[in-house]
Amino acid sequence: MDSNLLEDGTDDILRAVLERTDGDLVVVDPSAEVITSLVELGSEYDGELPALDVVADERLLKDVMDDFIVASAAADLVEAGDMTLRNLEDGADNTLLVGEDSLYALVRAGEHVAALSADDDSFIADAYETFHDQWAEAEPFNLRTPPLDHVRSTLAEDIGEDVQADFDAVLSSLETARGDGDGLDEVTISLLVAAKNDVLLYDISKWGEDVGIASKATFSRTKTRLEDMGLIDTEKVPIDVGRPRLRLKLGDEKLRGADAASLAGVAHSMLN
């Protein structure tokens, strides 16, 4: 029988459960914090990661996956077959972590998080069958964000390795990438990094549309907003046929003087 677990934080309790789990782990009705922690742990897990079969409230999943940092890392796990995301019809009383021979209910009390273990083998077996079937019958969640590994590799190939390095540095400096006042969204980040490297708007928006970040129209609208606010400038570049294309440049001296790691902080302060 597995013993109860008590840790200071969600990351610690989930890591302990993962280390005890063989086979797959059905995660039933997780909170936003649990989903985010699972994605972070899965991305950096050292060892054989159990298959994470997550069945969660669709509205909650949409909210969590509005953060590009979380969503792109989750997409990496989904593409690798390490995680599935499905929509939960009816919630559970607590977040449940259900393995073939283990069952934990997550409970938070004050500053601590506990994973309370069931001690009846037949009950655990029945619970696994029940919740695994529930997961199997659930509708897949439509995760539209492209995998981060694909974003990074195509950015290096299509635009340039310096741009990809700056993109990585900006993401690493952020806790969230939502664009809702708590951080910059992925389109804004892409445009700022492109402007830092004097990339054409056509090139970065075509890359963004091809990789699945956003449409060219969204890139264009965001460029106009950033230009109106003084973060980005453009200069016309003549071409042989058709209208001149626009080269992106950083529009403010504070941004031009910032390295990639501090670029997001400076831009965020200007936007707010």
Image (spheres, rainbow, N blue to C red):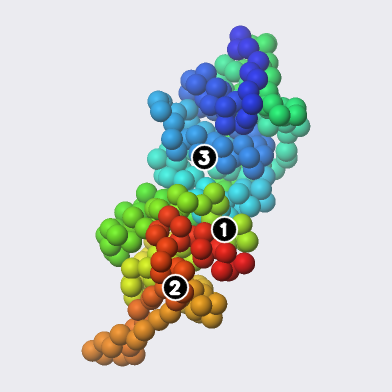
Front position in the image: 130 or 233 = 233
Residue 214 rendering spot, x and y as whole percentages? 47, 66
Q: Which residue is mark 3?
A: 39
Q: Residue at x 58, y 69 (%)?
A: 271
- Quarter of the picture containing the N terminus is top right
**Between discs 2 and 3, the one toward the N terminus:** 3
**Against 23, is 92 above or below?**
below
Q: Could you tell whether 113 is left or right of 251 in the image? A: right
- Quarter of the picture containing the C terminus is bottom right
Q: Which residue is mark 1?
A: 183
Instruction: Select label 2 or label 3 by which is in front.
Output: 2
What mark, if any, has residue 253 been given in the picture? 2
**Mark 1 crowdedness (10 Å alpha carbons): few <14, some 14-19, many ≥20:** many
Residue 56 rendering spot, x and y as whole percentages? 64, 41
* Quadrant of the image occupied by residue 9: top right
**Mark 3 crowdedness (10 Å alpha carbons): few <14, some 14-19, many ≥20:** many
Q: Secondary structure at mark 2?
A: helix
Instruction: Select label 1 or label 3 by which is in front.
Output: 1
Q: Amino acid at mark 3?
A: Val
Residue 124 rendering spot, x and y as whole percentages? 64, 17
Image mark count: 3
**Against 174, is 205 above or below?**
below
**Between discs 1 and 3, the one toward the N terminus:** 3
Q: Secondary structure at mark 1?
A: loop
**Against 133, is 114 above or below?**
above
Q: Residue at x 40, y 40 (%)?
A: 80
**Between discs 1 and 2, the one toward the N terminus:** 1
* Quadrant of the image occupied by residue 37: top right
